[in-house]
Amino acid sequence: MFKKTASKSLLLAGLAAIAQPAAAQTPPQPAPTPAPSAQRPNIIVILVDDMGFSDISSYGSEIPTPNIDALANSGLRFTQFYNTARCSSSRAALLTGTYPHQAGVGHLEAISVSASKGLQGKLLNRVVTMGEVLRSAGYFTAMSGKWHLGMSHGVNPWDRGFDRSMTSATGGLYFPGQPHPGAKFVFIDGKKTPTSSPEVGSGQWYSSDMFVDWGVKFIHEAQQQQKPFFLYLPFVGVHFPLMAPAEDVARFRGKYREDWDKLRRERFERQKAMGLIGKNEVLPGRLPNTYNWDKLSPEDQDRFDKIMAVYAASLVGVDKAVGTLVTQLKQTGQFDNTLILFVADNGGNAEEGPDGRLENAEILGGPKSTTFAGMNWATLQNTPFQHFKHHTEEGGIATPLIAHWPKGIDAGLDGSFVRTPGHLIDILPTVVQVAGATYPTIFNGHEIVPMQGRSFAPAFRGQMLHRDQPIFWEHEGNRAVRDGKWKLVARFRQPWQLFDMSHDRTETRDLAGTNPTRVIKMANQWDKWAEASDVDPWSESYDVYLNGAIRQNWGTQNMPRHPEAMDEMTPLLRSSLAKKQ
């Protein structure tokens, strides 16, 4: 009982570190005297790759994720938490507490525009990482997983605040010996190491397990040094090329030979029943260019079942690894005073369009296979929302957030919901507060961009969360503003739409026409934010992955194989198909 009170006293004391604007704070030189490590929590941030809002069962899924759900049931679930709609940009926001363009990573690492301040493809020296802040506060800092923040440009985790690191440069790694170019090597504290090396892991390891094994190793080292630890654990799952152990894939074969609309309605009803979304919310229909399940041949239906079986198995692999991590924390007596945050980097991934992708699948989900879930399954993954990764509609930016900390979250709140909107930029302010750390204004001789978010630690005591500024987004010209109950959102080169999120979280009733004054006000807010945050006007020519093609409504340019199975088609796709004939 005493220890729990001590942790909460530290949390209250931490308010002093973030209560004022970051620009007015004192740099940690010399570093503040750390509180006793028994009082400061260990911190683990788990990031899942390309996972949809409804994919874990505590957010409505049929996929069993008991270990993640156990954290939700004895912690907090956030119902309106947001990412940035894309991989690298979300990692930048999470680790720096700034908007991604301010950090230099307004798009992926491969998108580097010399004349732009916000599209540099790497973390810039004008921001600090969570590792740098916590190491300055006396924490042992480690990461194990996917970086994707500029290794190709010379920006590495071992140079940005992490004492120990097991790093996949850009992800895509599931098994040793994969033929995929980005999966042939990892970096152990900067040492380039073949994935087939026994130094990485023994036998035919699976990366979710391997990353956790290394994370546990780092935790033991922190114990030996008698330091609290920070572990950043960005899994590769469930990003393409989706892979999973054969026995896990076999568990799900046949379970998705069923209409995705029916599965989506079932997820929606579970979400309403558990109170995750309002009982009066409307489930929007599938977007144009998706397939009607009943118009597909049995062979195509079986192919789609294979795809989703691999996806589900990959997510189960993440859940098993989380279970391993929790077991180790309990066995070493560290579980109760460890803050665990679980979040995703963007919405479900519709890339490869309505067909998805299944190649070299003689061993389904095996090391030589390539699997993309595609647009139809991404629609299920993002239930109850529309749109996907890339987009600033809810389907692209809504993420689960689970917070678990037995000694820091009031026990009476276990299993409850936090319904105030939040964003990845809020994670670093929260960590600074609970760790008793100080956010710098100057670091290594560089002036540092102030944190843009606010701490959600008051929610750990059941207090209301307040936000002084709206939340903003820009990705590939898609943009949005969230201000209280109102959300203004627009696709690239399209007009603004306005939604009242307190009654229409699924964005089905555009109120822009009846609220022109509010639209103008919020659009002006976005313009001022973009100018101040290094958000340059987007050009599709910046995206090296498009190769000059026209982007379709699933985020990329692939052409569908079965347009006859569509109930509705966009004019753009119709025109593209006509040109191809």
Image (spheres, rainbow, N blue to C red):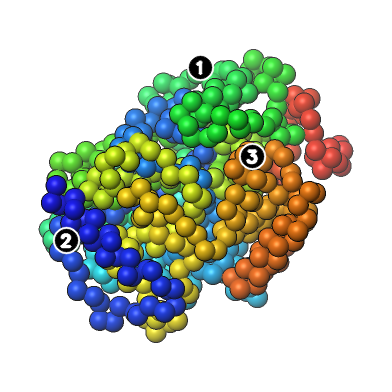
Quarter residue 570 falls in:
top right
Element type at marker 1? loop
567, above or below 387, in the image? above
- Count of numbered badges drawn on the protein: 3
Residue 477 x/y as whole percent: 69, 58
Using residue 418 as the reference point, say whether residue 581 is left or right of it: right
Front in this rendered view, residue 85 or 208: 85
Front in this rendered view, residue 205 or 312: 312
Quarter residue 163 falls in:
bottom left
**Where does label 3 land, which residue?**
504
**Where does label 1 land, which residue?**
254
Front in this rendered view, residue 184 or 451: 451
239, above or below 447, in the image? above
Residue with the most extreme top position:
298
Element type at marker 2? loop
- Residue for point 29% across, 65% down: 14
Element type at marker 3? loop
Sequence-wise, which precedes: disc 1 or disc 2? 2
Mark 3, mark 1: which one is toward the viewer? 3
**Where does label 2 land, which residue?**
37
- Residue for point 45% across, 68% down: 451
Residue 540 x/y as whole percent: 72, 59
> Which amino acid, mark 3?
Asp
